[in-house]
Image: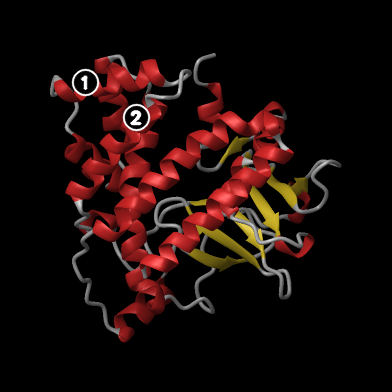
Amino acid sequence: MKKKRSEELGKIIKRIDVIKKNRPSHKEILDFFKYIIREQHKIKPLIKTERIDINEETAKKQMKEGFPLIDKKDINPDMDSAVTLFKNICKVLQRKEKIAPEIKKINQAIRNKEIDLREIFGRLIEGDKGYIEFIANKSGLHTWLLTFLAESSIKPSLEAYADMLKGHVDQESWWKGYCPVCGSQPERGELRIDVGERFLECSSCSFKWRFKRVVCPFCGNDDSKKLRFFNTEADGKAYRVDVCEECKKYIKTIDLRELNVEVVPLVDDIGTLHLDIIAEKEGYKRGVPGILEMEKMGE
């Protein structure tokens, strides 16, 4: 297992280096995520999860009725590992000149007990981002950064639960725009090599599930006249942005059929930040706020 984790991290770092070489303008944000990904992989072997007992009959019933396998409010994440990861991420990000002042303020707020990380993680899992915004405003912190660091710190625990439950997901019956494991919204999509089937990736637990090609996962719009996608000549057909004219949201999609290299969806997503910028300029918002918010920091 240790060797497998090491190989997985090595693959991610290699892909980051390749994209940095091809797109030097994205170097700063790619390095930012590289630090975080490394720390997440270091903590994974230490994460403890409580077993969730769910029988096949119950799982099938939940799938059929449109309920995810777990309610995130019932998850008991490894808070100790999440706190350790949060502090480790802050430690390495102090090296980044652009973000160092904000990291310093967050560390000071923790020392002054203005921030209770365990409370933040719990509220985040429950979907209460308003609490984090309240704490950030009260302490003069950057709301997006505090939320992002908390999400990054709790994510490995949620991924561990997804790995535990993935065998209960029926890909044939689940066609929802939210994750069948934890109910969160998708962060990105991909078109698979075999027959171009569309899969979505969960923003919280990273589980991937099959979804209809011509449907907006955020509002359910299936009117082909109000759905479109765009790409750039430089990127070709491999990277595209699927937009919905109904809710004005978008999701980035990687067409794996157009690439002859092994990609890392997260990294390739970061490496196409320019597509997010184009989408926002055209009046669309990403379904799940992400890397573009990092790029705006310091402006």
Residue receiving disc 1: 109
Residue 256 pos. (x, y %): 71, 62
Q: Is residue 66 depicted above or below 141 in this figure? A: below
- Residue at position x 69%, y 42% in the image: 245
Q: Is residue 132 depicted above or below 196 in this figure? A: above
- Residue at position x 52%, y 28% in the image: 293
Residue nearest the viewer, comparing 83 with 246? 83
Q: Amino acid at mark 2?
A: Leu
Q: Return the residue found at the far left.
A: 113
- Residue at position x 63%, y 38% in the image: 248
Q: Which mark is residue 146?
A: 2
Colouring used for the render: secondary structure
Residue nearest the viewer, comparing 274 with 183? 274
Residue 14 pos. (x, y %): 59, 51
Specify whether residue 98 is in view: yes
**Image position of 86 (left or right of 114):** right
Q: Amino acid at mark 1?
A: Ala
Mark 2 falls on what kind of element?
A: helix
Mark 1 falls on what kind of element?
A: helix
Q: Is residue 63 depicted above or below 234 in this figure? A: below
**Image position of 53 (left or right of 191):** left
- Residue at position x 34%, y 51% in the image: 42
Residue 128 pos. (x, y %): 29, 39
Residue 292 pos. (x, y %): 57, 31
Residue nearest the viewer, comparing 124 with 234? 234
Q: Return the residue found at the far right.
A: 233
Mark with earlier residue (1, 2): 1
Near mark 1 (Cα within 10 A), the count class, few <14, some 14-19 or many ≥20, is some
In three-dimensional space, the C-alpha distance between marks 1 and 2, rounded to whole angstroms, equals: 11 Å
